Image: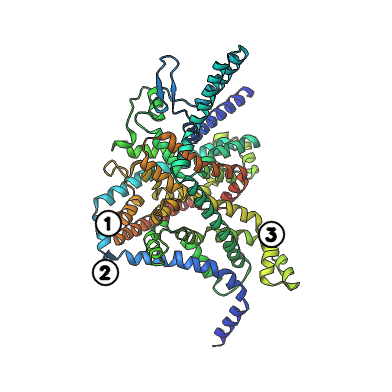
Amino acid sequence: MKLRRTSSKLITYTVLVVWAIISLLPLYWVFTTALQLSEYQDETTGQVISYVDSEPPKLYPMGIPKYFEEWGLARDAESAGDIVQAEHHRERMSAIVADTFSGFKTLFAGTNIWRWFFNSAYIAIVVTIGILLLDTMAGYVLAKKNFPGRNFIFWSIIATMMIPGQITLVPLFMMVGELKLMNTHWALILPDLSMVFGVFLMRQYMLSVPTELLEAARIDGASEWKTFWKIVVPLAKPAMATLGIFTFMNVWNSFLWPIIVLDDASLYTLPVGLKTLQDQNLAIFKLLMSGAAIAAIPMIVVFIAFQRYFIKGLTMGGVKE
Amino acid sequence: MKASNGLLKEMWKQRAAYLFLLPKLILFILFIVIPVFWAFLIAFQEYGYSGSKWVGFDNFIKTFESETYRVALLNTLKYTVITVPLNIILALGLSTLIYPLGRMSQSFFRGAFYLPTVTSMVIIAMVWRWVYNYRFGLFNYFLDFFGIPPQDWLNQSDTALWALIIMSVLIPPGVGIIMYLAAMGSIPESLYESAKIDGANSFQRWWRITVPLLKPTTLYLTMLSLIGSFQVFIQVILMTGGGPGDATETVVHLIYKTAFRDLEFGLASAQAVVLFIITLIFGVVQYRIMYRKGEE
């Protein structure tokens, strides 16, 4: 019995670990390729090989072991008193470091990638703040106030959550053109601010907040606006954290709409910039993966820092992918 | 008169609530309600340099008669029919394995499977393009291990769609795993205990108790991934561009091309409306099947 339990645990772990490796391999491959040496000498044949040609593919950045190897050799040469040789190895070390990060260097020097990063961050932050304010206000009154037309408004909002986004592409495109917003960041920000899942989420959450707390504030003679800031917002903080995280993620990763409305390379967001990068450098994988790494890092950091809220948001239900 | 007076009074009393709702409502009407209705109007028009003219059902007739739309629809359906069930089964299977583990392992695996989902699909598609590369890709290298000859996966019409399908199955169903784990946590332990007393083995307990009780989650997830896979686009535009030929043309990619490459706004709108209706039908049918089964 004991043996059976141990073996089934072993199988469970094996399956999970293998599948986790398969799942994470693409992301790992982004970073490995980004940091791979562009070329290195093959130990056996002495040939200089480009990283893409290496057979078998190198599953880690080659620069790391090579760097330490040179470091060891430099130390040995120093203790042997051979200053020239030591200097030579030191030069090799800095060449390895330079080559490892050359993808990033090329991007920073030759493209607008900083600009794209900044655009992405700024748009995502503006939209997140706007959505938090608008949706907390809307969710609060939809949950806690009884006014004529409340249910009609709420159900209209829910109904549109079922509609696939592509249907509004063409009319939105025309509207943006009419409003003279084509090729501006407003063309991304305004439609993003109209996303509705946050209203649904905030309302669900506010329903569970006891009404007595709000009543108490009103009896004390606080204005609606003050009640909202002093009582509703502090109470809604956990739900707002979740909504904020998901909004940021959705905006940071959005792609279809930005490629339609943005023309100027200086206005691109990261995903759009990456696409043009790929269109221009189809086969320079080190460069492409360096760009991909720059776009991936912030989201990975956000995820690790706020994992709790991601899980909470998904299990609250109704969060659209 | 009196009634409407009462209503107005009530509305005036609640003016603060309307003001709180107003900013979101304006944006919602401007950028969602109006565009949705407008999309239906555009679908009945033809846009040229000189403006637009009404053409009745022409765009819809063109859509149904178009070979490309049919191919795109079939590709999208094939992609959906294979990836959605597999992703749901994977999510359920992996969750079943993760659930009994300790707290630490549970959150580790949950994180590992969810992480790729938070990074942009653009990044995932770029790296897979590299993985599928004929000469240098990891994929062919692994296949070589098993003696399978290398393929130019993305550039052959009989493998390109399969490459996208394989990729989609290998991207972990992170959302599904998190939702299933949460749902499993809410199943009362007593059910399992009484089943144990009745002599049910662990598989029977899983099949008879866990799976049926997870039905609402399964339905919700199926809906989500169905809508998601009908809209498959990023992989197509970044990895194959719909080619070779129209081997990987999908509905949304075609809508995108029709509207923003050919500038056929009316036709693109009609294509989008048809997609919407198909999505709706699928959703309703699926809902009925799942709940009909539940009642028996």
Q: Residue at x 29, y 66 (%)?
A: B45
Residue indicated by mark 2: B53
Q: Are marks 1 and 2 on the same chain?
A: yes
Mark in the foreground, 1 or 3:
3
The numbered dot on residue A234 is 3
Give the image location of residue B181, x and y in percent: 58, 43
Are dots 1 and 2 in contact, CB under 8 Å?
Answer: no
Give the image location of residue A195, x and y in percent: 50, 59
Q: Are marks 1 and 3 on the same chain?
A: no
Is A199 drawn above or below residue B171 in the view shown? below
* SS at circle 1: helix
| Quarter occupied by residue A223 | bottom right
The numbered dot on residue A281 is none
Residue indicated by mark 1: B63
* SS at circle 3: helix
Closer to us: A106 or A227? A106
* SS at circle 2: strand
Amino acid type of the residue tagged 3 in the rendering: Pro
Amino acid type of the residue tagged 1 in the rendering: Thr
The reply to whether residue B100 is in sight is: no
Q: Residue under mark 3: which chain is it in?
A: A
| Quarter occupied by residue A276 | top left
Q: Residue under mark 2: which chain is it in?
A: B
Which mark is first along the chain, 2 or 1? Answer: 2
Q: Residue at x 53, y 54 (%)?
A: A122
Closer to us: B192 or B46? B46
**Quadrant showing the N terminus of chain A:** top right
Q: Furthest-right residue in view?
A: A220
Left or right of A285: which side holds B61? Answer: left
Q: Residue at x 38, y 57 (%)?
A: B276
Give the image location of residue B235, x and y in percent: 39, 43
